[in-house]
Amino acid sequence: MNRFIVFCLASFCVISVFSQEFRVSVSVNSTQLQSSDREVFQQIQELLTEFVNERKWTDVTYEEYEKIEGSISITITEHSTQEDFKGDINLQLRRPVYGSTYTTTLLNTQEQGFTFKFTQGQSLEFEQNNYTNNLVSTIAFYLYYFLALDADSFEHNGGNKYFTVCQNIVTASQRSASKGWKRAEDNRNKYWMVENYTNTTYRYIREASYQYHRLGLDMMQGDSQAEARNNIMEALENVKRAHREKSDLVAVKQFLDAKSDEIVNIFKGAPQNEKSRVVDLMKVIDPANTNKYEQILQQGQQ
């Protein structure tokens, strides 16, 4: 079931005019710099806000209530020349849960050491098969990554076409001197992010997203909580399968970074057998957070 159908179930559906996909807050923070021209950072922020939220990224019509929500925060740590910038990007993607006011985090990650060039008066132009500059290509990559993760959470493999665009951006960026695009640099950059999701060996992580969100969280309201928890447990079993294929998958790390606290909250009121099962499972997938998951066992039994 796709995102549009899910939301139509939640409220009266009216076909509207062409609408952009995102409601994403964008910030550019330069407070770490001793002294600098703040005007250029304000200009970057305004241009990126327009680039993200006012450009049409897909051929899908989004109602206002369907827009994808998240945040992109760039912290500038170096401004070495008039046009050279370096910093970190923090990215968060959120998804509403059907039948509730709750929103769940799909992505909460950071790219460190992000470099780009920018001159005042510059426009931001994007073509997926043509690398123009690192600022545009990086932000566009993450927006299509947002679209892919969001779509996967509503429909099994729903993000296919958006992951394909991510691949195209990565391919076009291979000639860039900027870090973050190449296979050999590290195993958690943009190359590996899209590789993990498109490599069929790790297909379990995408199956997990649909199970966890559409068959799990979206069913938590009403009388279906036991079934919903069981589907979430099955999703976590799929995460475990992906982890067994390769223990340092960036896709698994991102899933756990987004979901660890939520998993504790979901199962802390579950029957004891479910608590024990999920804690044992999470100790295998995410041993660094063993103490966090053991909190589930300390909660009162349902």
Image (spheres, helix red, strand yellow):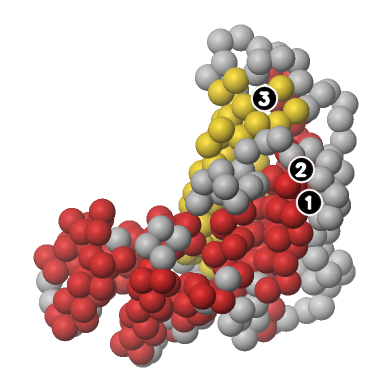
Q: Indicate the quadrant where residue 49 lies.
A: top right
Which is nearer the N-term, disc 3 or disc 1?
A: 3
Q: Amino acid at mark 1?
A: Ala
Mark 2 highlights which residue? 175
Query: Which residue occupies the foreground of this view, 197 or 153?
Result: 197
Residue pictured at 66% horizontal, 15% vertical: 80
Residue at the front extreme, as displayed? 184
Quadrant containing the N terminus is: bottom right
Mark 1 Cα shell of 10 Å, populated few (<14), some (14-19), many (≥20): some
Which is nearer the N-term, disc 2 or disc 3?
A: 3
* Left or right: residue 150 compared with residue 250: right
Query: Which residue occupies the foreground of this view, 228 or 245?
Result: 245
Residue pictured at 68% horizontal, 36% vertical: 178
Image location (x, y in percent) of residue 131: 81, 45
Mark 2 Cα shell of 10 Å, populated few (<14), some (14-19), many (≥20): few
On residue 172, which mark appears?
1
Question: Could you give the CA–CA distance between mark 1 and mark 2, rounded to whole angstroms?
Answer: 7 Å
* Left or right: residue 245 compared with residue 56: left
Residue pictured at 31% horizontal, 66% vertical: 285
Question: Could you give the CA–CA distance between mark 2 and mark 3, rounded to whole angstroms?
Answer: 19 Å
Looking at the rendered structure, the secondary structure element under dot 1 is helix
Quadrant containing the C terminus is: bottom left
Q: Amino acid at mark 3?
A: Phe
On residue 85, which mark appears?
3
Residues at discs 2 and 3 in contact (Cβ within 8 Å) = no
Total marks shown come to 3
